[in-house]
Image (spheres, rainbow, N blue to C red):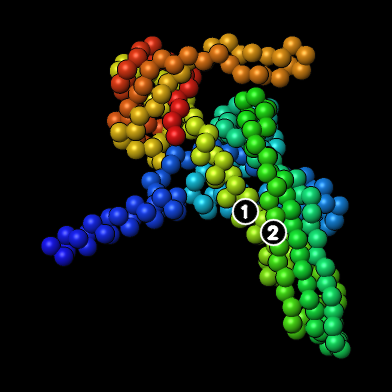
């Protein structure tokens, strides 16, 4: 009897933990996002290339969260150059080459603008220099602020925008090298107040993106239809499991703004529901639960 009550308490505790901490809840489908190089509007440390550096940090943090598949836009240019070179015929025929137009499209583009990147130091007491190292009593504070925007890649619409910040400080006995200082991302930078403030801002950005992306339905595509089997372009890499059900939409006419040429959206119609019966790493097989007329490029949606 006591054992049974204990099991009930443990089960209830697990439910409560999952409700309070979403990370313990059932894993959601991983959505494809892309991170662009951040725009440096802070007007400081421009030689550090902090735009690329912070984009790299956010990319890594999003990957480590386990909630996203991240396409690095910083590598896009080099990939396209490689594709163009392969298409030019100047490469050997041996081996596989990158196919033009075969990069998977991100569902959401993450764009950042660095608005504040500041560090202040207040010295105190007597200092001394030993072979290029200054030993003194310093009080350092750092502040980093970034505006993060989530952009719908199909329409270019800004879905949401949020300012995230990071603050850090350090005090006591300080050791500064009187030669060149730490550069962004170099060894030792992460231990400085500015490095810590940057990491806090990135962590807050990940929390923001994760929270907002929960409200955006996951999307995939139908690859092909083989008899009664519907192949979709996602598998275990996005967290799909046997038994998952998805709503399928057929994409109709695109609506283009006549003044700006911007894609405003598309006419879509729901055609049915499918259920996954087999999962591979990058694709899944499904069968129709309701509806008919499924075809390649149909949109597959789910949470």
Query: From the viewer's perspective, is residue 53 above or below residue 300?
Result: below
Residue at 39% across, 52% down:
18
Where is residue 158 drawn, in percent x and y? 68, 32
> Is residue 99 among the parts visible in the rendering?
no
93 lies left or right of 122: left
Residue toward you, 300 or 185: 300
Residue at 40% across, 32% down:
283
Residue toward you, 21 or 48: 21
Where is residue 213 drawn, in percent x and y? 54, 39
Where is residue 199 drawn, in percent x and y? 65, 60
Query: From the viewer's perspective, is residue 212 above or below residue 293?
Result: below
The image quadrant of residue 118 is bottom right
Query: From the viewer's perspective, is residue 260 above or below residue 119?
Result: above
Q: Which mark is residue 166?
A: 2
> Is residue 224 among the parts visible in the rendering?
yes
Where is residue 296 drawn, in percent x and y? 45, 18
The image quadrant of residue 160 is top right
**Is the C-beta separation of discs 2 and 1 under 8 Å?**
yes
Residue at 75% across, 61% down:
143
44 lies left or right of 98: right
Label 1 crowd (10 A; few <14 / some 14-19 / many >=20): some
Label 2 crowd (10 A; few <14 / some 14-19 / many >=20): many
Residue toward you, 263 or 122: 122
Query: From the viewer's perspective, is residue 227 above or below residue 63?
Result: above
The image quadrant of residue 247 is top left
Which numbered disc, 2 or 1, marks the residue that appears first in the sequence? 2
| Helix, strand or loop at mark 1 | helix
Q: Which mark is residue 204?
A: 1
| Helix, strand or loop at mark 2 | strand
Name the residue furthest left.
Answer: 1
- Which quadrant: the C terminus? top left
């Amino acid at each position: 009897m006591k054992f049974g009550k204990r099991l009930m308490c443990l089960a209830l505790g697990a439910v409560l933990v999952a409700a309070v901490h979403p990370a313990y809840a059932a894993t959601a489908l991983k959505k494809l996002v892309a991170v662009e190089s951040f725009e440096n509007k802070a007007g400081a440390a421009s030689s550090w290339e902090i735009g690329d550096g912070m984009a790299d940090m956010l990319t890594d943090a999003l990957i480590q969260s386990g909630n996203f598949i991240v396409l690095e836009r910083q590598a896009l240019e080099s990939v396209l150059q490689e594709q163009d070179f392969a298409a030019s015929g100047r490469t050997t025929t041996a081996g596989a080459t990158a196919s033009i137009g075969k990069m998977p499209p991100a569902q959401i583009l993450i764009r950042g603008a660095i608005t504040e990147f500041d560090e202040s130091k207040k010295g105190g007491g007597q200092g001394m220099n030993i072979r290029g190292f200054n030993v003194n009593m310093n009080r350092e504070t750092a502040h980093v602020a970034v505006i993060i925007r989530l952009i719908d890649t199909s329409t270019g619409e800004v879905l949401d925008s949020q300012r995230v910040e990071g603050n850090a400080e350090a005090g006591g006995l300080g050791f500064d090298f009187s030669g060149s200082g730490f550069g962004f991302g170099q060894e030792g930078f992460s231990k400085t107040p500015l490095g810590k403030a940057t990491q806090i801002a990135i962590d807050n950005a990940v929390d923001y993106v994760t929270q907002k992306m929960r409200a955006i339905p996951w999307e995939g595509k139908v690859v092909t239809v083989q008899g009664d089997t519907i192949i979709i372009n996602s598998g275990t890499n996005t967290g799909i499991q046997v038994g998952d059900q998805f709503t399928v939409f057929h994409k109709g006419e695109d609506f283009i703004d006549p003044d700006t040429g911007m894609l405003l959206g598309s006419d879509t119609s729901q055609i049915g529901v499918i259920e996954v019966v087999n999962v591979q790493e990058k694709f899944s097989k499904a069968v129709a639960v309701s509806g008919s007329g499924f075809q390649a490029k149909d949109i597959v949606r789910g949470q």
